[in-house]
Image (cartoon, rainbow, N blue to C red):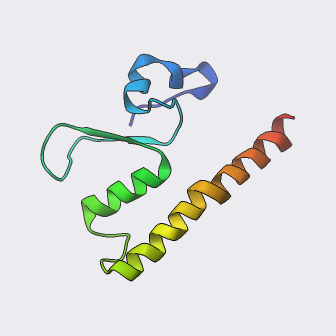
């Protein structure tokens, strides 16, 4: 685990931008990818969740109907609830 202090602007440093070019959290580095190759960095919560589901064979249904239901809710969260909750917090706390 590498701490990223957003109060100090660590998310804009070149080392972090190699992991998350959009300078935001969450971001992960998988140093033991399923294919045994070089480490893989993944940013954005939805991409991370799909990556972990694929890597582990868990967290998402194996059948197409169950998988699509999970993907629908995932996209709803990352495209709807997540941004709205973030904006609400920002404007309530800072504006």
Going by the picture, which residue comes out furthest to the left? 36
User: Can you tell which quarter of the image residue 60 is in?
Assistant: bottom left
Q: Tell me what residue is drawn at x 40 percent, y 82 percent.
A: 65
Q: Tell me what residue is drawn at x 65 percent, y 58 percent.
A: 80
Residue 47 placement (x, y as % from top left): 42, 51
User: Can you tell which quarter of the image residue 95 is in?
Assistant: top right
Residue 18 placement (x, y as % from top left): 37, 26
Residue 41 placement (x, y as % from top left): 33, 38
Nearer the observer, 4 or 64: 64
95 over 58 or under it: above or below? above
Q: Tell me what residue is drawn at x 33 percent, y 55 percent.
A: 51
72 over 79 or under it: above or below? below
Left or right, residue 51 beside residue 31: right
Q: Tell me what residue is drawn at x 67 percent, y 59 percent.
A: 81
Nearer the observer, 67 or 45: 67
Left or right, residue 81 beside residue 33: right
51 over 64 or under it: above or below? above
Residue 50 placement (x, y as % from top left): 38, 58
Number of numbered discs present?
A: 0
Left or right, residue 60 beside residue 34: right
What is the quadrant of the N terminus in the image?
Answer: top left
């Amino acid at each position: 685990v590498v701490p990223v202090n957003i109060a100090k602007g660590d998310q804009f440093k070149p080392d972090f931008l190699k992991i998350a070019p959009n300078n935001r959290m969450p971001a992960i580095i998988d140093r033991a990818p399923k294919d045994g190759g070089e480490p893989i960095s993944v940013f954005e919560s939805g991409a991370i969740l799909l990556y972990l589901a694929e890597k582990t064979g868990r967290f998402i249904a194996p059948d197409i109907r169950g998988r699509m239901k999970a993907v629908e809710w995932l996209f709803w969260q990352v495209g709807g609830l997540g941004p709205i909750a973030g904006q609400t917090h920002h404007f309530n706390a800072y504006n």
